[in-house]
Amino acid sequence: MIQEAGLDGFWIHRVLQAEGIESHVVDPASIATSRRRRRAKTDKIDGEALVRALLAYKRGEPRVCAMVRVPTPAEEDRRRIARERKALTNERVRHVNRIKGLLFSQGVSGYEPLRRNRHKRLEELKTGDGRPLPAHLKTQIGRELDRLELLIEQIEAVEAERDAMLAAEQRASPARRCCST
């Protein structure tokens, strides 16, 4: 059995192996494709390519495909912290850019939504032509700031969890214990 690494994670591989079925997980980018023409992409074509790659791999042909080392459930779960942090920081960037874009449409630049005094500063902003910010715009940006603050709290929580996990690993590391005595 062969499958591409992807959204399904590795649970299918683990179930198959627990049932005694030989299973391989391949890096999808390592499967050779024709570069001369755009090829059709169907499940049937992809399945046939996977079977050909597995057969060549089992024959010992070099560089046919790259098999993925399947992480343990604990290793897989450990990766989630970094992935969640990345998703949260990407979302934070989108909120900051949205706020700056809304303000830029009114001729306002230089406002930093990540500063601690963001709400106070929002109240003081004037449009490019000197008017106070329109009421609905100010309300919309206020809601964006509320969502941004929730993201900041979540990022801090994820980073604290990550730091605690790393500290525990360092304390438990045999190399750390032998070198620190």
Image (spheres, helix red, strand yellow):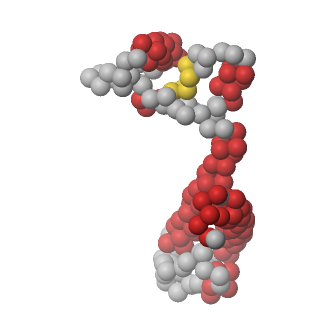
Between residue 92 and residue 68, name the one nearer to us.
Answer: 68
Residue located at (63% from left, 48% from top): 79
Residue located at (45% from left, 12% from top): 55
- Residue 72 percent coordinates (x, y): 66, 38
Residue 94 lies, with reference to residue 104, above or below; the image says: above
Between residue 150 and residue 74, name the one nearer to us.
Answer: 74
Describe residue 51's horizontal placement relative to residue 74 as left or right.
left
Q: Quadrant of the N terminus?
A: top right
Q: Quadrant of the C terminus?
A: bottom right
- Residue 62 percent coordinates (x, y): 36, 23
Residue 167 lies, with reference to residue 117, above or below; the image says: above
Residue located at (32% from left, 21% from top): 34
- Residue 140 percent coordinates (x, y): 67, 68
Between residue 121 and residue 125, name the one nearer to us.
Answer: 121
Residue 83 visible in the shown view: yes
| Residue 16 quadrant | top right
Residue located at (53% from left, 70% from top): 100
| Residue 22 quadrant | top right
- Residue 105 percent coordinates (x, y): 50, 70
- All told, the count of numbered labels is 0
Between residue 115 and residue 70, name the one nearer to us.
Answer: 70
